[in-house]
Amino acid sequence: MTVNPSGWRPSAPANEQGEMQTVTGNRALMLEEPLIFEIGSVNQTGVDFAELPDRAARLGGLERSRSIGLAGLSEPEAVRHYTRLSRQNYAIDLGLFPLGSCTMKHNPRLNEKVARLPGFADVHPLQPQETVQGALEAINQLALWLLNLTGMYGVAMSPKAGAHGELCGLLCIRAALEARGDMRQVVLVPESAHGTNPATAAFAGYRVESIPANVAGRVDLEALKARLGPDVAAVMITNPNTCGLFESDMIAISQAVHKVGAFVYCDGANFNAIVGKVRPGDLGIDAMHINLHKTFSTPHGGGGPGSGPVVLSEALAPYGPLPFVAKSPDGSFKIVEEENAGDEHPDAFGRMVAFHGQMGMFTRALAYILSHGADGLKQVAEDSVLNANYILRSLEDVLDAPFAQCGPCMHEAIFSDKGFAEGLSTIDVAKALIDEGFHPMTMYFPLVVHGAMLIEPTETESKASLDQFIAAIRSVAERAKAGDQSLKAAPVHAPRRRLDETLAARKPVLTYSDPQPAEAAE
Amino acid sequence: MTVNPSGWRPSAPANEQGEMQTVTGNRALMLEEPLIFEIGSVNQTGVDFAELPDRAARLGGLERSRSIGLAGLSEPEAVRHYTRLSRQNYAIDLGLFPLGSCTMKHNPRLNEKVARLPGFADVHPLQPQETVQGALEAINQLALWLLNLTGMYGVAMSPKAGAHGELCGLLCIRAALEARGDMRQVVLVPESAHGTNPATAAFAGYRVESIPANVAGRVDLEALKARLGPDVAAVMITNPNTCGLFESDMIAISQAVHKVGAFVYCDGANFNAIVGKVRPGDLGIDAMHINLHKTFSTPHGGGGPGSGPVVLSEALAPYGPLPFVAKSPDGSFKIVEEENAGDEHPDAFGRMVAFHGQMGMFTRALAYILSHGADGLKQVAEDSVLNANYILRSLEDVLDAPFAQCGPCMHEAIFSDKGFAEGLSTIDVAKALIDEGFHPMTMYFPLVVHGAMLIEPTETESKASLDQFIAAIRSVAERAKAGDQSLKAAPVHAPRRRLDETLAARKPVLTYSDPQPAEAAE
Amino acid sequence: MRYLPLSDADRSDMLRVIGAPSIEDLFRDVPQELRLKGPIDGLPLHASEMAVERHMTALSRKNMVAGDVPFFLGCGAYRHHIPASVDHVIQRGEFLTSYTPYQPEIAQGTLQMMFEFQTQVARLFGCEVANASMYDGSTAMWEAIVMGHRITRRNKTLLSSGIHPHYVSVAKTMAKFTEDRLDIGLPDLAATTDAERLIASIDDQTSAVVVQYPDVLGRITDLTPIAEAAHAAGALLIAVVTEPVALGLIRSPGEMGADIVVGEGQSLGVGLQFGGPYVGLFACREKHVRQMPGRLAGETVDAEGKRGFVLTLSTREQHIRREKATSNICTSSVLCALAFTAHLTLLGEKGLRQLASLNHARACEAADRLATIPGVRLVNDSFFNEFTLRLPVEARPAVHAMVERGVLGGVSLGRLYPGAEKLQNGLVVAVTETASDEDIAALETALKELCA
Amino acid sequence: MRYLPLSDADRSDMLRVIGAPSIEDLFRDVPQELRLKGPIDGLPLHASEMAVERHMTALSRKNMVAGDVPFFLGCGAYRHHIPASVDHVIQRGEFLTSYTPYQPEIAQGTLQMMFEFQTQVARLFGCEVANASMYDGSTAMWEAIVMGHRITRRNKTLLSSGIHPHYVSVAKTMAKFTEDRLDIGLPDLAATTDAERLIASIDDQTSAVVVQYPDVLGRITDLTPIAEAAHAAGALLIAVVTEPVALGLIRSPGEMGADIVVGEGQSLGVGLQFGGPYVGLFACREKHVRQMPGRLAGETVDAEGKRGFVLTLSTREQHIRREKATSNICTSSVLCALAFTAHLTLLGEKGLRQLASLNHARACEAADRLATIPGVRLVNDSFFNEFTLRLPVEARPAVHAMVERGVLGGVSLGRLYPGAEKLQNGLVVAVTETASDEDIAALETALKELCA
Ligand SMILES: Cc1ncc(COP(=O)(O)O)c(C=O)c1O
Ligand SMILES: Cc1ncc(COP(=O)(O)O)c(C=O)c1O
């Protein structure tokens, strides 16, 4: 008999809190669930197949001999397994998910439905182009709308996520520079940048140097100017930046960068705040990725899939990668890829991915844009900024808000842990919020604010929801300031208490090991 | 500001248990949710409409003037509202649901998918018949298979649930009797029968008399025979009966009933136990409803929709209701209803429902039958009986099993509260099971067993799942026998503690009342 | 078998615990000679999911899909756009695979939703209370009639000729057995309904007058005079609503004095589904609630004083009262009620009004255009989203001829009232927000050709 | 706007709390002259759900649906039947709308699922560890190559000519910038692969040899000799699997000595989706885990000692290590990994073997029948569910001509290798369990006509 080490115990120990324990380890609707390897078996299956006629295999003599060790479950067990697991997750569908920088907004169910239309979901990427005109038209329409929204010149649709888009942008820049024989080696990245920015620059073969922020939480223009020179290939700006502030010197920054022959890459993760309000193309930006899974609400799915189209300035567009969709004079759509790039797009830097990018995300984003329209997208930006400022102003008396004096924030509000009592930190506030029924905010990012708490409510939260969140965070913040050490025990109501991350990293257990025969016999 | 009286309180009282309270009333993933009337408003909407051209209304002068009072929610709020509510429910997808008589088995997701195919879901019931041949063929195919599985002569597909099927069966009987000028007035129903049996008999205009059970939990054949006479229209038997036992005298019962010119109605709610093992038609039954939402696994959905086709013997089939589907000589399918019944089915007792019955359940049941096939359905019966006997034998030493000595049970096992300590009853065991992560068994039904606990595991439970359930129930039963009064506090981990049903019935609050202006202003 | 978790090894282990030699032995109470030896005849063997899906898809493709063609059918089932989130909600396993909420501690989701549904239905119908759903509109109407008998202790019921003929047929069927007296007639192809006849027929034997609103031909009549006449004679007014969306625009039956209002909830959230499952709506006055059929969710508190909901007033119901219950209904249509309430919550009052206005506007547009076809006459003076045309030809063959032109052009009265000579040229046309301008034009063209 | 909960009244209340005169004022940091005054040009205004659904449906209907026709495309994307419960699981809001599980106390669902996925991938590939997903197979291959560089501190990589040309193209693109040296060739239309050439080319500069298994023409080669040769030279063997279902029947690359095994997981659970989103699989030896890219879930305990899972070894990742990270990947493809793991859990080892056998049997059947067409030659000696035919005519026009006959008959090598003369007559045909006998017959007929 396989026993779930995580839950089911045949006796009922009382826990520290003296809470009523159960023999199953379950707490009513909060159910413990073992691993598939503990409940399934290699002989169990949840899929039926028709009987097979016997015939000789032509497998080059490489038939498998050993068992793989893949546990199967019948369908009832499988549905229950994943349903139970799902119930151990927080999600937007459950409540406010104020993860700054991540833009966790409502995911319309219509978009899930359209992405599953057989005409999109059941189409092969290598089907002859005359059989996929609707798919190509959809990509083309989304591409054009992204261009309109950003005021840019070209767009590469294939990148698979934001970081992949960053890579695409930097490779365009590199290709443009190389085309003029200019082998620059440095990319400047603000201290406050998201980790993907420096990582991408390194991945693209650049040396990364940091540029400091000023007291107003923006890029220090003078410091930047001082560092700019002929070795700098690009500056990676995030705008609105990761402190939730608009880079008010953006035009000056772009001009300075262009002046030294470098390019401005903009991390567009925060496009949500300004979509429909201002066009990045008007800010002097040369390349910017758009996280369709943020601004255009394709679901995060626990960590992807995302989609990171990159809009490009006129200077960079010729270098954009293959493949892309183009409209032919006869109104039909075609794929420009290796074979016809020579005529149509000779300077492409290459290909980033097999096939055409995240079609399933394109259809969702397209439905999202159609649903909102130009007026709705503008409202998205306005409401997201309004919600963030409401939070900023409703909390600035209980939490330190380092940039609150500099004016309004954009779509997210940032606070520090200043004023918390000895021994208590941002993480304790965050974990206490879990008990209150909220996902914590982004913690300890960006690095430029001590014990940062970055709160992005998004525009899809109601005022009632914000008010409840504010009440909860005020209560927890007061406790943190008063030195209530019980915060360190939080969360107490979640499926798990705080987890030992050190143990996990010190002795990594990354896959399940079958019990040794001796154990199994117990 | 509207405050949720059920949950969110701006202060955090400690509860009796001294459990850590939150300001929101939430407990991490267990979230409190107000009523739509408390969070929504008549001006909020989650649906967009195109602008309307102005035009004069032709509403007969009956335009609405007053507000209706329907609160609306935006889509994000609505999705969250229902998601949160759903999380306060137990369900088969979460775990074992051992409700005896209710047959809570796994609901295959394939069946949900096929029921939603546009060719079934988006078809109007009054479409010309040449445009709904697939729908008619599906109904016909299901009807034929139900006939094969039951060995009966005809089937009425339109009844909307089990109780409606009972009504259909009794009306057939009544029509058959009236056709021979025989106005009998009594229907005999065993004590152990489900409440719908007597209620239906009364609804159909009959006087109900009860027949007793014998010590082996079956109908007392001699008592039945003694009561039978020319005033008896029908006997309603449940087989397997509500004690989970096969009526071993079934043939004798049928013969006795037929001998006095009465009919045998069989409540087929428990068909799950014998499907593919024995055909009700071979047991002398004249009419039997089949709960597609039990044996054929269409989902219960929190209390329907169900579907209750009724199979009929040769004697009753001519009286079955309209409409039904028939196959024409040319292979096409047609609806027999009022207009053509004269030729095809002149003795129909009438119509039970608008349109054709529960199409959405037919498609699911058809997919279920196709998936299992003749071999799988037999296995269904066998595994359901095996699982029930496993439970019976694994618990009979800790719980009183009144009929355990008489041999195996069928698909459900029954226990009594005999041996529980003073002050503790079946309900306390049931509520403690909630804390253990299980739905309680059927309680206090059937009435013939004191403090009855009727456990139907169904065939879609794994042995591991049964073992965990057995361990939990053993632990709880031991506590009940030992007089552990803390059981009376159970459940403690569920979204709610025990609810005051007396209060609810004494001062019924059946709809939400908007707060009076004075309250609202608070 | 993908749905059956037991392995053969499990089965032997379990038999050992049970102490039975074989599974067959567990069936020993079933007469040996009747037990089937192998898989039952006449059914295929088990099939893979792929095979089943293909079979069902092939069947489904033999039907003409409403959404694929210009579509104008109504008469008790209406095609509206259902927001995608509604289907998402009803597919939550915790709703889909749960049982009737007899264990309220772990069924608050269903119970609260029922309570919200009851409140919405009561408000929409202009009544004080509503139950948590019936099977459908037609059975709800019959239950209302017998509830009327219980209240008035009379058993004669007057049915308006504007009631959907299937509903009438159900009532007639049941009345045969319960010996209720029903008074029924055929509708006329005219703008005026039989309100006056009904009022004139009320007497001191009358338990209730039953009127559909809007009626099966789409006509809208003021119920106030009927209610007054009924009440004056100690009778009840029962109103039947088959298109609840109409109530976004027109007065509710409750406001006009109806004592019991029943209806079909299909048009919100549920979809066409070839006729079922649908959801019956049932509302009445608070003073009559103990005579009401069906489940009721009520508010209460738990042991800690927190608000919660339970099934209540169960002493009306079969599982408590058995043969003395107000109805035999048990399983009703809760998941469809969830779809209904979720759709209505998404709409809210604002959305419902907009939806209703849009329907009315589309219907007015279509009526005006179709009425210009030579020989075609609009029967209705008043209508919501459905009206009746008198064609210059028999409507039933015209409907079939329209199918050949790829148009589902309405319901012929010949289909609904076979044999009723005077109605054979009647065509009932429903026009909802889903009908585009092109759809209306296609109908116009088809009808023009057929009436030429 | 249905997705925006704030009312105008809310907006004014909130502005009052904020102390700002208008929403516009909150945008004061954005240069005034660049702020758009009204709704942006070039986009329509907001639309109802019904309108959007219609627009998208109309677009989707312009595509030929794989499931509607005889379908034989593969080459890196395979059409398998996906159990309905897989889609149900990935639509659970708690999976669909959750974020990367940085807060493990309320993300155990995703974390445990990742841990199970990692275990399945590792076992399937015959490796010790696997990560929690990459974007797709093509990017995973490049990440494996650069991981190889980090491990071996060499930067020359030999690519087999049997690798999917898109994958090669991605590697070539990236190598231009990283100055990695890649050695690449074109495949031959022959039964034997370039294994010998690869072995001969390994030298002490070689970081890794990369081989696809089965390869793009469907051929299956024993990797053992390549692994041995690579290891002897201090190089790694990287295997690429684009059809993981094959591993239900053939030996895993890990068993044959591959050090890193990457793959495309699309064929389990994910579906075709016109190329994305898919899910990259990535497995390797435990000793190399700290060089691995991507997220990893690991086991640990909570404060009460209960088992739980967390994201671990994050010091490899960009959010901790920034420019020193092993990769820049952040968002990967977790929901697709969920679909993959759910499908594989439903299959289990037994089901996977059966599925693989069925695929192989279907492919053998098709290969035998197609090879009898005059002029058509089967290139492969060995294959799993995909093989290459040499046609007597150019394959690319033949594919288009088959479309006119309603058959999606395979991928022409002309499409994949434009300009490569020697490959123009090659047609790659994939045959999965979804291909019926009638489908195969339709392909046979079409090809016969075109080759006549
Ligand atoms: C500011 C910022 N930049 C870049 C990224 C990376 O985007 P992705 O996760 O889609 O690769 C993120 C995502 O978290 C981000 O917040
Ligand atoms: C034995 C028995 N008979 C009849 C019924 C009534 O069936 P339904 O609820 O479908 O009306 C039930 C359902 O609970 C039952 O268990």
Image: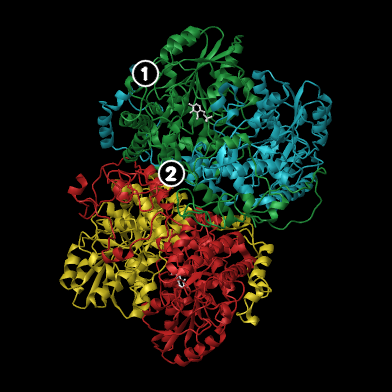
Chain colours: A red, B green, C cyan, D yellow
- Amino acid carrying label 2: it is Asp
State which chain disc 2 sits on: B
Label 1 is placed on what type of residue?
Leu
What is the quadrant of residue C141 in the picture?
A: top right
- Element assignment for label 2: loop
Q: Nearer the viewer, residue A47 or C305?
A: C305
User: How far across and down, in percent of the image, does residue B238 sit?
Assistant: 46, 21
Taking B339 as reference, is D203 left or right?
left
Specify the label residue C333 is tagged with. none
Check disc 2 and report the residue beneath it. B93
Q: Where is residue A155 drawn, in percent x and y? A: 51, 73
Q: Which mark is residue C34?
A: 1
Judge from the rendering whether residue B163 lies leftward or rightward of residue A487; answer left or right. Answer: right
Q: Is residue B439 visible?
A: no
> Disc 2 to disc 1, how far (Cα)?
36 Å
Give coordinates of residue C273: x percent, y percent.
Answer: 58, 40
